[in-house]
Protein backbone atom coordinates (compact mmCIF):
# COMPACT_ATOMS: atom_id res chain seq x y z
CA UNK A 1 0.00 0.00 0.00
CA UNK A 2 1.17 3.50 -0.75
CA UNK A 3 2.52 5.80 1.94
CA UNK A 4 1.54 9.16 0.41
CA UNK A 5 -1.21 9.66 3.00
CA UNK A 6 -1.02 9.09 6.74
CA UNK A 7 -4.02 6.74 6.83
CA UNK A 8 -5.11 3.80 4.71
CA UNK A 9 -8.66 4.32 5.96
CA UNK A 10 -10.64 6.55 8.27
CA UNK A 11 -13.83 5.39 9.97
CA UNK A 12 -16.20 8.37 10.20
CA UNK A 13 -18.95 8.07 12.81
CA UNK A 14 -16.90 5.51 14.69
CA UNK A 15 -18.68 5.84 18.04
CA UNK A 16 -22.16 5.25 16.65
CA UNK A 17 -23.89 1.88 16.68
CA UNK A 18 -22.73 0.66 13.27
CA UNK A 19 -19.44 2.49 13.56
CA UNK A 20 -18.43 0.76 16.80
CA UNK A 21 -19.14 -2.69 15.34
CA UNK A 22 -17.14 -1.79 12.25
CA UNK A 23 -14.23 -0.62 14.39
CA UNK A 24 -14.30 -3.92 16.29
CA UNK A 25 -14.21 -5.85 13.03
CA UNK A 26 -11.22 -3.84 11.83
CA UNK A 27 -9.36 -4.47 15.08
CA UNK A 28 -10.13 -8.20 14.95
CA UNK A 29 -9.73 -9.00 11.26
CA UNK A 30 -7.86 -6.45 9.15
CA UNK A 31 -4.04 -6.57 8.78
CA UNK A 32 -2.24 -5.49 11.92
CA UNK A 33 -0.11 -2.95 10.03
CA UNK A 34 -3.16 -1.09 8.71
CA UNK A 35 -2.83 2.65 9.29
CA UNK A 36 -6.22 3.94 10.30
CA UNK A 37 -8.14 6.54 12.25
CA UNK A 38 -11.44 6.72 14.07
CA UNK A 39 -13.27 10.01 13.59
CA UNK A 40 -16.31 11.70 15.11
CA UNK A 41 -17.53 14.72 17.02
CA UNK A 42 -16.72 13.70 20.61
CA UNK A 43 -13.08 13.24 21.59
CA UNK A 44 -14.08 11.63 24.89
CA UNK A 45 -16.16 8.97 23.14
CA UNK A 46 -13.45 8.38 20.56
CA UNK A 47 -10.76 7.95 23.21
CA UNK A 48 -12.96 5.50 25.10
CA UNK A 49 -13.49 3.52 21.90
CA UNK A 50 -9.74 3.56 21.22
CA UNK A 51 -9.13 2.07 24.69
CA UNK A 52 -11.65 -0.69 24.01
CA UNK A 53 -10.10 -1.45 20.62
CA UNK A 54 -6.64 -1.74 22.13
CA UNK A 55 -7.93 -4.48 24.43
CA UNK A 56 -9.06 -6.50 21.41
CA UNK A 57 -5.55 -6.62 19.92
CA UNK A 58 -2.86 -4.62 21.72
CA UNK A 59 -0.17 -5.78 19.25
CA UNK A 60 -1.64 -4.17 16.14
CA UNK A 61 -1.27 -0.56 14.99
CA UNK A 62 -3.82 1.36 17.01
CA UNK A 63 -6.10 3.93 15.39
CA UNK A 64 -5.43 7.63 15.60
CA UNK A 65 -8.24 9.82 16.94
CA UNK A 66 -9.63 12.60 14.74
CA UNK A 67 -12.35 14.95 15.98
CA UNK A 68 -14.40 16.45 13.19
CA UNK A 69 -17.72 18.17 12.64
CA UNK A 70 -19.75 17.49 9.51
CA UNK A 71 -18.60 20.69 7.84
CA UNK A 72 -16.71 20.96 4.57
CA UNK A 73 -13.55 22.58 5.94
CA UNK A 74 -13.12 20.07 8.78
CA UNK A 75 -14.02 17.05 6.65
CA UNK A 76 -11.59 18.12 3.94
CA UNK A 77 -8.81 18.26 6.51
CA UNK A 78 -9.47 14.78 7.89
CA UNK A 79 -10.46 12.96 4.70
CA UNK A 80 -7.49 14.41 2.85
CA UNK A 81 -5.27 12.33 5.14
CA UNK A 82 -6.83 9.02 4.11
CA UNK A 83 -7.14 6.93 0.96
CA UNK A 84 -10.50 5.42 1.95
CA UNK A 85 -13.40 6.70 4.07
CA UNK A 86 -15.91 4.42 5.75
CA UNK A 87 -18.97 6.59 6.38
CA UNK A 88 -21.17 5.46 9.27
CA UNK A 89 -22.80 8.83 9.83
CA UNK A 90 -26.40 8.00 9.01
CA UNK A 91 -29.14 8.86 8.57
CA UNK A 92 -27.51 9.51 5.21
CA UNK A 93 -30.17 11.92 3.90
CA UNK A 94 -29.24 14.13 6.86
CA UNK A 95 -25.47 13.70 6.94
CA UNK A 96 -24.28 11.87 3.85
CA UNK A 97 -23.94 14.42 1.08
CA UNK A 98 -21.36 16.63 2.77
CA UNK A 99 -19.11 13.59 3.27
CA UNK A 100 -19.50 12.53 -0.36
CA UNK A 101 -18.60 16.05 -1.50
CA UNK A 102 -15.51 16.09 0.71
CA UNK A 103 -14.37 12.68 -0.55
CA UNK A 104 -14.67 13.80 -4.17
CA UNK A 105 -12.82 17.04 -3.39
CA UNK A 106 -10.00 15.18 -1.62
CA UNK A 107 -9.93 12.22 -4.05
CA UNK A 108 -10.67 9.83 -1.21
CA UNK A 109 -12.54 6.61 -1.96
CA UNK A 110 -15.75 6.03 -0.01
CA UNK A 111 -18.00 3.22 1.25
CA UNK A 112 -21.28 3.38 3.18
CA UNK A 113 -24.44 1.41 4.01
CA UNK A 114 -26.97 3.82 2.53
CA UNK A 115 -30.25 2.16 1.63
CA UNK A 116 -32.48 5.16 0.93
CA UNK A 117 -32.95 4.47 -2.77
CA UNK A 118 -34.46 7.85 -3.80
CA UNK A 119 -31.63 9.64 -1.97
CA UNK A 120 -29.07 7.42 -3.69
CA UNK A 121 -30.53 8.25 -7.08
CA UNK A 122 -30.29 11.94 -6.24
CA UNK A 123 -26.62 11.56 -5.23
CA UNK A 124 -25.79 9.56 -8.35
CA UNK A 125 -27.38 12.18 -10.59
CA UNK A 126 -25.81 15.10 -8.72
CA UNK A 127 -22.28 13.81 -8.04
CA UNK A 128 -21.75 10.77 -10.25
CA UNK A 129 -19.96 12.49 -13.11
CA UNK A 130 -17.63 14.51 -10.88
CA UNK A 131 -16.70 11.33 -8.99
CA UNK A 132 -15.92 9.56 -12.27
CA UNK A 133 -13.81 12.41 -13.60
CA UNK A 134 -11.89 12.50 -10.30
CA UNK A 135 -11.43 8.71 -10.22
CA UNK A 136 -13.16 8.50 -6.82
CA UNK A 137 -14.91 5.21 -6.07
CA UNK A 138 -18.15 5.59 -4.08
CA UNK A 139 -19.56 2.23 -2.90
CA UNK A 140 -23.09 2.40 -1.54
CA UNK A 141 -25.38 -0.11 0.26
CA UNK A 142 -22.47 -2.11 1.66
CA UNK A 143 -24.29 -3.55 4.67
CA UNK A 144 -26.66 -6.35 5.58
CA UNK A 145 -28.80 -4.52 3.04
CA UNK A 146 -27.52 -4.93 0.31
CA UNK A 147 -23.99 -6.34 0.08
CA UNK A 148 -25.30 -9.67 1.38
CA UNK A 149 -27.83 -10.12 -1.42
CA UNK A 150 -25.79 -8.39 -4.12
CA UNK A 151 -22.67 -10.53 -3.67
CA UNK A 152 -24.57 -13.81 -3.27
CA UNK A 153 -26.42 -13.04 -6.51
CA UNK A 154 -23.16 -12.34 -8.33
CA UNK A 155 -21.55 -15.51 -7.02
CA UNK A 156 -24.38 -17.81 -8.11
CA UNK A 157 -24.69 -16.13 -11.53
CA UNK A 158 -21.00 -16.63 -12.24
CA UNK A 159 -21.17 -20.25 -11.03
CA UNK A 160 -23.89 -20.92 -13.61
CA UNK A 161 -21.97 -19.21 -16.40
CA UNK A 162 -18.71 -20.99 -15.54
CA UNK A 163 -20.32 -24.42 -15.84
CA UNK A 164 -22.79 -23.88 -18.69
CA UNK A 165 -21.68 -20.71 -20.55
CA UNK A 166 -25.30 -19.58 -20.11
CA UNK A 167 -26.54 -16.21 -18.97
CA UNK A 168 -29.04 -15.91 -16.11
CA UNK A 169 -32.74 -15.25 -16.58
CA UNK A 170 -33.59 -14.97 -12.88
CA UNK A 171 -31.97 -15.10 -9.47
CA UNK A 172 -34.36 -16.29 -6.78
CA UNK A 173 -33.07 -15.46 -3.29
CA UNK A 174 -34.48 -16.84 -0.04
CA UNK A 175 -33.82 -15.31 3.38
CA UNK A 176 -33.64 -18.49 5.48
CA UNK A 177 -32.39 -17.22 8.82
CA UNK A 178 -31.61 -13.75 10.07
CA UNK A 179 -31.10 -11.69 13.22
CA UNK A 180 -32.15 -8.14 12.41
CA UNK A 181 -33.02 -5.56 15.06
CA UNK A 182 -33.07 -1.94 13.83
CA UNK A 183 -30.94 0.78 15.37
CA UNK A 184 -32.14 4.31 16.04
CA UNK A 185 -30.53 5.64 12.89
CA UNK A 186 -32.16 2.99 10.71
CA UNK A 187 -35.60 3.62 12.17
CA UNK A 188 -35.29 7.37 11.74
CA UNK A 189 -34.20 6.88 8.13
CA UNK A 190 -37.39 4.92 7.42
CA UNK A 191 -39.62 7.47 9.16
CA UNK A 192 -37.96 10.39 7.39
CA UNK A 193 -38.27 8.67 4.02
CA UNK A 194 -42.03 8.58 4.43
CA UNK A 195 -41.99 12.21 5.62
CA UNK A 196 -40.01 13.55 2.68
CA UNK A 197 -41.12 11.45 -0.29
CA UNK A 198 -44.23 12.23 -2.31
CA UNK A 199 -46.46 9.65 -3.93
CA UNK A 200 -44.81 10.16 -7.33
CA UNK A 201 -41.31 9.40 -6.01
CA UNK A 202 -42.52 6.37 -4.07
CA UNK A 203 -44.16 5.05 -7.25
CA UNK A 204 -40.94 5.60 -9.23
CA UNK A 205 -38.92 3.82 -6.53
CA UNK A 206 -41.15 0.78 -6.98
CA UNK A 207 -39.95 0.44 -10.57
CA UNK A 208 -37.43 -2.43 -10.77
CA UNK A 209 -34.78 -0.56 -12.81
CA UNK A 210 -35.01 2.70 -10.85
CA UNK A 211 -31.28 2.80 -10.00
CA UNK A 212 -29.89 1.02 -13.04
CA UNK A 213 -28.05 3.12 -15.64
CA UNK A 214 -30.00 1.18 -18.30
CA UNK A 215 -33.43 -0.43 -18.27
CA UNK A 216 -33.90 -4.18 -18.32
CA UNK A 217 -36.79 -6.29 -19.47
CA UNK A 218 -40.23 -6.03 -17.97
CA UNK A 219 -40.14 -8.11 -14.79
CA UNK A 220 -42.65 -10.71 -13.70
CA UNK A 221 -44.04 -11.40 -10.22
CA UNK A 222 -44.17 -15.21 -10.08
CA UNK A 223 -46.27 -15.55 -6.94
CA UNK A 224 -49.84 -16.67 -6.38
CA UNK A 225 -52.66 -14.47 -5.09
CA UNK A 226 -51.43 -15.02 -1.51
CA UNK A 227 -47.95 -13.76 -2.35
CA UNK A 228 -46.46 -17.27 -2.15
CA UNK A 229 -44.18 -19.14 -4.52
CA UNK A 230 -42.79 -22.67 -4.56
CA UNK A 231 -39.28 -23.21 -5.89
CA UNK A 232 -38.15 -26.79 -6.55
CA UNK A 233 -34.83 -26.21 -4.79
CA UNK A 234 -35.58 -23.49 -2.24
CA UNK A 235 -39.03 -24.67 -1.14
CA UNK A 236 -41.94 -22.52 0.01
CA UNK A 237 -41.27 -18.79 -0.36
CA UNK A 238 -43.20 -15.71 0.78
CA UNK A 239 -43.01 -12.29 -0.89
CA UNK A 240 -42.60 -10.70 2.55
CA UNK A 241 -38.91 -9.79 2.70
CA UNK A 242 -38.80 -6.28 4.17
CA UNK A 243 -35.75 -5.29 2.11
CA UNK A 244 -36.77 -6.85 -1.20
CA UNK A 245 -37.48 -3.55 -2.97
CA UNK A 246 -34.23 -1.92 -1.91
CA UNK A 247 -32.21 -5.02 -2.67
CA UNK A 248 -33.77 -5.45 -6.10
CA UNK A 249 -32.94 -1.84 -6.99
CA UNK A 250 -29.29 -2.32 -6.03
CA UNK A 251 -28.87 -5.77 -7.66
CA UNK A 252 -30.45 -4.43 -10.85
CA UNK A 253 -28.04 -1.49 -10.72
CA UNK A 254 -25.18 -3.99 -10.52
CA UNK A 255 -26.64 -5.69 -13.61
CA UNK A 256 -26.57 -2.39 -15.51
CA UNK A 257 -23.07 -1.45 -14.38
CA UNK A 258 -21.42 -4.74 -15.36
CA UNK A 259 -20.86 -4.65 -19.11
CA UNK A 260 -24.19 -2.96 -19.72
CA UNK A 261 -26.13 -5.99 -18.54
CA UNK A 262 -24.13 -8.48 -20.63
CA UNK A 263 -22.31 -10.16 -17.73
CA UNK A 264 -25.51 -11.34 -16.06
CA UNK A 265 -27.65 -11.56 -19.20
CA UNK A 266 -29.99 -9.27 -21.08
CA UNK A 267 -33.14 -10.97 -19.74
CA UNK A 268 -32.05 -10.94 -16.09
CA UNK A 269 -34.26 -10.17 -13.11
CA UNK A 270 -33.89 -10.55 -9.33
CA UNK A 271 -36.63 -11.68 -6.94
CA UNK A 272 -36.32 -12.02 -3.15
CA UNK A 273 -38.44 -13.86 -0.59
CA UNK A 274 -38.52 -15.08 2.97
CA UNK A 275 -38.44 -18.84 3.38
CA UNK A 276 -41.81 -19.58 5.03
CA UNK A 277 -44.75 -21.89 4.88
CA UNK A 278 -48.05 -20.48 3.61
CA UNK A 279 -49.56 -19.55 6.98
CA UNK A 280 -46.46 -17.78 8.30
CA UNK A 281 -45.75 -16.19 4.94
CA UNK A 282 -49.24 -14.74 4.48
CA UNK A 283 -49.27 -13.50 8.09
CA UNK A 284 -45.94 -11.75 7.64
CA UNK A 285 -47.01 -10.20 4.34
CA UNK A 286 -50.18 -8.83 5.92
CA UNK A 287 -48.19 -7.44 8.87
CA UNK A 288 -45.80 -5.68 6.48
CA UNK A 289 -48.70 -4.22 4.52
CA UNK A 290 -50.25 -2.87 7.73
CA UNK A 291 -46.93 -1.36 8.82
CA UNK A 292 -46.48 0.34 5.45
CA UNK A 293 -50.01 1.74 5.70
CA UNK A 294 -49.31 3.11 9.19
CA UNK A 295 -46.01 4.65 8.08
CA UNK A 296 -47.94 6.61 5.50
CA UNK A 297 -49.86 8.35 8.32
CA UNK A 298 -48.22 11.46 9.77
CA UNK A 299 -49.83 10.94 13.20
CA UNK A 300 -48.34 7.44 13.47
CA UNK A 301 -44.90 8.71 12.42
CA UNK A 302 -44.93 11.53 14.97
CA UNK A 303 -45.88 9.11 17.76
CA UNK A 304 -43.31 6.54 16.64
CA UNK A 305 -40.49 9.11 16.72
CA UNK A 306 -41.04 9.55 20.47
CA UNK A 307 -40.07 5.94 21.07
CA UNK A 308 -37.28 5.51 18.52
CA UNK A 309 -33.74 5.30 19.98
CA UNK A 310 -31.48 8.23 19.15
CA UNK A 311 -29.08 7.93 16.20
CA UNK A 312 -26.06 5.93 17.34
CA UNK A 313 -28.11 3.79 19.71
CA UNK A 314 -29.55 0.34 19.15
CA UNK A 315 -29.83 -3.21 20.47
CA UNK A 316 -27.24 -4.53 22.92
CA UNK A 317 -23.99 -4.83 20.96
CA UNK A 318 -23.25 -8.19 22.58
CA UNK A 319 -26.40 -9.68 21.03
CA UNK A 320 -25.01 -9.01 17.56
CA UNK A 321 -22.44 -11.74 18.10
CA UNK A 322 -25.04 -14.38 18.96
CA UNK A 323 -27.24 -14.40 15.88
CA UNK A 324 -26.92 -16.24 12.59
CA UNK A 325 -27.61 -15.27 9.00
CA UNK A 326 -28.27 -17.68 6.15
CA UNK A 327 -29.44 -16.87 2.65
CA UNK A 328 -29.83 -19.22 -0.30
CA UNK A 329 -30.18 -18.41 -3.98
CA UNK A 330 -30.57 -20.11 -7.33
CA UNK A 331 -29.58 -18.73 -10.72
CA UNK A 332 -31.84 -19.99 -13.49
CA UNK A 333 -30.30 -20.25 -16.96
CA UNK A 334 -31.79 -18.18 -19.77
CA UNK A 335 -32.50 -21.10 -22.09
CA UNK A 336 -35.65 -22.30 -23.80
CA UNK A 337 -36.04 -25.72 -22.19
CA UNK A 338 -38.63 -27.28 -19.91
CA UNK A 339 -36.05 -27.45 -17.10
CA UNK A 340 -33.44 -24.69 -17.42
CA UNK A 341 -30.16 -25.49 -15.71
CA UNK A 342 -29.61 -24.04 -12.26
CA UNK A 343 -26.81 -23.03 -9.92
CA UNK A 344 -27.20 -22.88 -6.14
CA UNK A 345 -25.51 -20.57 -3.65
CA UNK A 346 -25.55 -20.20 0.13
CA UNK A 347 -24.27 -17.37 2.31
CA UNK A 348 -23.74 -17.86 6.04
CA UNK A 349 -22.49 -15.62 8.85
CA UNK A 350 -22.35 -16.10 12.61
CA UNK A 351 -23.73 -12.85 13.97
CA UNK A 352 -26.52 -10.35 13.57
CA UNK A 353 -27.37 -7.90 10.81
CA UNK A 354 -25.23 -5.09 12.24
CA UNK A 355 -22.29 -7.40 12.82
CA UNK A 356 -22.30 -8.45 9.16
CA UNK A 357 -22.68 -4.78 8.22
CA UNK A 358 -19.49 -4.04 10.13
CA UNK A 359 -17.79 -6.89 8.28
CA UNK A 360 -18.93 -5.67 4.86
CA UNK A 361 -17.84 -2.08 5.57
CA UNK A 362 -14.42 -3.05 6.94
CA UNK A 363 -13.66 -5.68 4.31
CA UNK A 364 -15.00 -3.47 1.51
CA UNK A 365 -12.73 -0.62 2.58
CA UNK A 366 -9.79 -3.03 2.76
CA UNK A 367 -10.63 -4.33 -0.72
CA UNK A 368 -10.38 -0.78 -2.04
CA UNK A 369 -7.27 0.11 -0.04
CA UNK A 370 -5.27 -3.01 -0.87
CA UNK A 371 -6.23 -3.34 -4.56
CA UNK A 372 -5.44 -0.11 -6.44
CA UNK A 373 -5.42 -1.92 -9.79
CA UNK A 374 -9.00 -3.08 -9.18
CA UNK A 375 -10.05 0.47 -8.33
CA UNK A 376 -8.41 1.83 -11.47
CA UNK A 377 -10.12 -0.81 -13.60
CA UNK A 378 -13.53 0.25 -12.25
CA UNK A 379 -12.75 3.86 -12.92
CA UNK A 380 -14.62 5.76 -10.20
CA UNK A 381 -18.21 6.84 -9.68
CA UNK A 382 -21.08 5.36 -7.68
CA UNK A 383 -20.95 1.56 -7.70
CA UNK A 384 -22.55 -1.34 -5.86
CA UNK A 385 -20.77 -3.87 -3.61
CA UNK A 386 -20.80 -6.60 -6.27
CA UNK A 387 -18.85 -4.38 -8.69
CA UNK A 388 -15.85 -5.02 -6.39
CA UNK A 389 -16.24 -8.64 -7.45
CA UNK A 390 -14.58 -11.83 -6.30
CA UNK A 391 -11.82 -9.89 -4.57
CA UNK A 392 -14.40 -8.54 -2.12
CA UNK A 393 -15.98 -11.97 -1.64
CA UNK A 394 -12.60 -13.56 -0.89
CA UNK A 395 -11.66 -10.85 1.56
CA UNK A 396 -15.03 -11.05 3.34
CA UNK A 397 -14.43 -14.74 3.98
CA UNK A 398 -11.50 -13.78 6.19
CA UNK A 399 -14.05 -11.81 8.23
CA UNK A 400 -16.44 -14.72 8.64
CA UNK A 401 -18.79 -14.25 5.65
CA UNK A 402 -18.94 -17.52 3.72
CA UNK A 403 -20.40 -17.99 0.25
CA UNK A 404 -20.47 -21.43 -1.36
CA UNK A 405 -21.82 -22.26 -4.81
CA UNK A 406 -22.48 -25.41 -6.86
CA UNK A 407 -24.45 -26.62 -9.84
CA UNK A 408 -27.78 -28.36 -9.38
CA UNK A 409 -27.39 -31.21 -11.82
CA UNK A 410 -30.28 -33.63 -12.42
Image: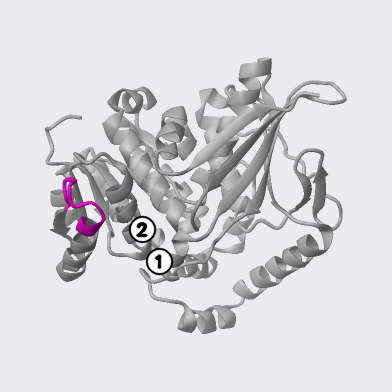
Image check: 284 left or right of 376?
right
Relative vertical location of residue 379 with respect to residue 8 in this rendering, above or below:
above
150 versus 333 height, above or below: below
Q: In which quarter of the image is the C terminus?
A: top right
Is residue 231 within the magenta segment? no
Residue 214 visible in the current orientation: no
**Residue 55 part of the magenta-drawn span:** yes
Left or right? Give the position of 229 relative to 148.
right
Mark-to-mark CA distance, 2 and 1: 8 Å
Q: Which percent across, then down, holds residue 142?
A: 44, 46
Q: What stretch is highlighted in magenta?
A: 54-63
The N terminus appears in which quarter of the rendering?
Answer: top left
Residue 316 at x, y = what percent? 42, 71
Which residue position is annotated with label 1? 317
Q: In which quarter of the image is residue 334?
A: top right
Q: As displayed, is residue 37 above or below residue 300?
A: above
- Magenta: main secondary structure equals loop
Residue 353 is tagged as none
The residue located at (40%, 38%) in the rendering is 398
In this picture the colour scheme is one colour
Q: Residues within 10 Å of mark 1 (few under 14, many from 20)?
A: some
How packed mark 2 is, by other alpha carbons closer than 10 Å (few <14, some 14-19, many 20 or more), is many
Position of 397 compared to 372: left or right? right
Residue 314 rendering spot, x and y as whole percentages: 42, 70
Say whether residue 344 is left or right of residue 404.
Answer: right
Q: What element carries label 2?
A: helix
- Among the two numbered marks 2 and 1 on one chain, the one whose residue lies closer to the N terminus: 2
Amino acid sequence: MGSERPYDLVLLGATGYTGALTAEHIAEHLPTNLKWAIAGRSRNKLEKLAEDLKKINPDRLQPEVETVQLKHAELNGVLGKSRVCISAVGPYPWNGEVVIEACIAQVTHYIDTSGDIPWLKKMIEKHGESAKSSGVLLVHSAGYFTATQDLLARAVILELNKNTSQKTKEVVLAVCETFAQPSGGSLLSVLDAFESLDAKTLAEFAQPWYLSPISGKETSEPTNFLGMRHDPDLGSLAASSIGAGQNRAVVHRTWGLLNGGDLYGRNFQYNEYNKHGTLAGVGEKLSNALLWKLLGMSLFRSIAKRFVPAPGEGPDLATQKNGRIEMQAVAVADEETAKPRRAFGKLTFSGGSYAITGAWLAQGAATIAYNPDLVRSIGGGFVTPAVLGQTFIDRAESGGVYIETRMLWD
